[in-house]
Image: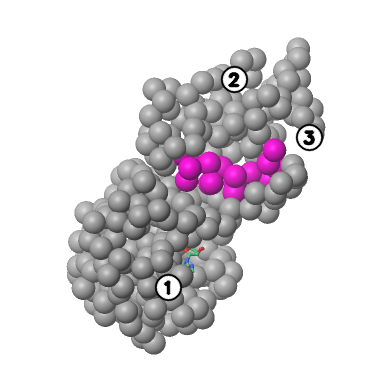
């Protein structure tokens, strides 16, 4: 298994040696390697079992570092980094050739961000290269928000995990791209609220790619537990005696069903099979607990997980995006 610790020099040695290590950030834990070195990047893809057409985000500790690896930093991108970094914002920028094709999956833009975690910032300050770091989970599974989550799934494949405690934000960064100079869009909803971004950009388009079929049906899931998840509406379930009827879907025994709720339990479902993200209704707390809760439910002796999602404001939009992607069935 991987060693877990707070020894930055040890992490530096592994990284300088083109090995990959688990790192904490404010969003989720990353699986980090030298972004300029193909051996390291190849390892990231192998350890995660990630298809090479899915590009990686690069991490540095300051804006002037990013400037070394991109051919242009538009004013608006600079302003966004300056206002929100370190923090959960990633921006796509035209790359220099020093960034290997493997990092960007051959695309002409490279994604950069400055993570807000004192250990990882300290690590980045002491390296001569940016870190490419996708989330430290097997491709398609739930992202890790503690060092132990990383250990549980990738521990046998990596030498070291930097222990940085629980992730503060709990969902991935917001990704911004530019159609053209000063015309930004949101490519992925995430930890930084759209309302905040709009203070710099004005009204911004959300081009979030989460698949939302118009008819209820099966989805290809991502960020997903092994148990099948159903993202449905309260009105689309009916509980009678010991069974729960999911409209358009199946009927289950109430003991086979887990529930992931926002601030309220679901009546009749055994309480031990339910996790409420934030009884006090705090949406930020719900985000912090989201991935851990999905992992916990995944371990329970149940067949399926039901969720109604969370309120659709602030980081709630990113939470619902992840829940939709995690679900096999969507109403
Ligand atoms: P993660 O697994 O959270 O690190 O996800 C990284 C995601 O960032 C990818 O799945 C892409 O959606 C996006 N991304 C990273 N680099 C690029 C790029 N060069 N162009 C477009 N999207 C990118
Ligand atoms: Mg990921």
Q: Is mark 3 within 8 Å of ligand 2?
A: no
- Return the residue nearer the eye: 297 or 327: 327
Residue 3 visible, this angle: no
Q: Is residue 95 visible?
A: yes
Dot 1, crowdedness within 10 Å: few (<14), some or many (≥20)?
A: few
Task: Please give the residue where the numbered disc 1 appears in the rendered image.
Answer: 180
Residue range highlighted in magenta? 316-331
Q: Residues within 10 Å of mark 2 (few under 14, many from 20)?
A: some
Distance of mark 1 from mark 2, alpha carbons? 47 Å
Residue 164 % position (x, y): 29, 49
N-terminal of the two: label 3 or label 1? 1
Front-most of 255 and 97? 97
Residue position for label 2: 266
Q: Is residue 324 magenta?
A: yes
Residue at the far front: name it: 202
Q: Against 252, is 288 above or below?
A: below
Viewer-closest of 220 and 49: 220
The residue under label 3 is 249
Q: Are marks 1 and 2 in contact (CB under 8 Å)?
A: no
User: Residue at image x 51%, y 81%?
Assistant: 106
Q: Which SS class for mark 3?
A: loop
């Amino acid at each position: 298994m991987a060693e877990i610790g707070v020894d930055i020099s040890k992490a530096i040695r592994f990284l300088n040696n083109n090995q990959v290590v688990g790192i904490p950030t404010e969003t989720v834990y990353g699986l980090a390697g030298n972004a300029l070195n193909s051996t390291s990047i190849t390892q990231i893809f192998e350890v995660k079992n990630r298809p090479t057409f899915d590009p990686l985000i690069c991490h540095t500790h300051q804006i002037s570092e990013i400037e070394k690896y991109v051919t242009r930093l538009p004013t608006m991108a600079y302003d966004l980094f300056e206002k929100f970094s370190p923090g959960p914002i990633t921006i796509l920028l035209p790359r220099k050739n020093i960034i290997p094709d493997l990092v960007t999956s051959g695309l002409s833009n490279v994604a950069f961000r400055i993570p807000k975690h004192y250990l990882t910032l300290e690590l980045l300050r002491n390296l001569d290269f940016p870190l490419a770091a996708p989330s430290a989970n097997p491709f398609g599974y739930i992202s890790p928000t503690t060092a132990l989550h990383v250990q549980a799934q990738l521990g046998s494949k990596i030498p070291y995990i930097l222990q940085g405690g629980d992730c503060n934000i709990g969902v991935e960064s917001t990704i911004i791209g530019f159609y053209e100079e000063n015309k930004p869009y949101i490519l992925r909803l995430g930890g930084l609220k759209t309302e905040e971004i709009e203070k710099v950009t004005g009204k911004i388009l959300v081009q979030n790619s989460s698949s939302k079929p118009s008819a209820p049906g099966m989805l290809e899931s991502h960020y997903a537990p092994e148990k099948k998840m159903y993202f449905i509406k309260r009105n689309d379930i009916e509980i009678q005696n010991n069974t729960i009827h999911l409209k358009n879907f199946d009927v289950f025994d109430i003991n086979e069903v887990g529930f992931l709720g926002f601030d309220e339990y679901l009546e009749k479902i055994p309480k031990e099979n339910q996790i409420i993200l934030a009884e006090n209704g705090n949406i930020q707390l719900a985000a912090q607990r989201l991935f851990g809760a999905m992992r916990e439910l995944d371990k329970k002796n149940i067949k399926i997980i039901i969720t109604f999602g969370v309120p659709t404001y602030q980081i709630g939009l990113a939470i619902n995006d992840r829940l939709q992607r995690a679900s096999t069935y969507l109403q």
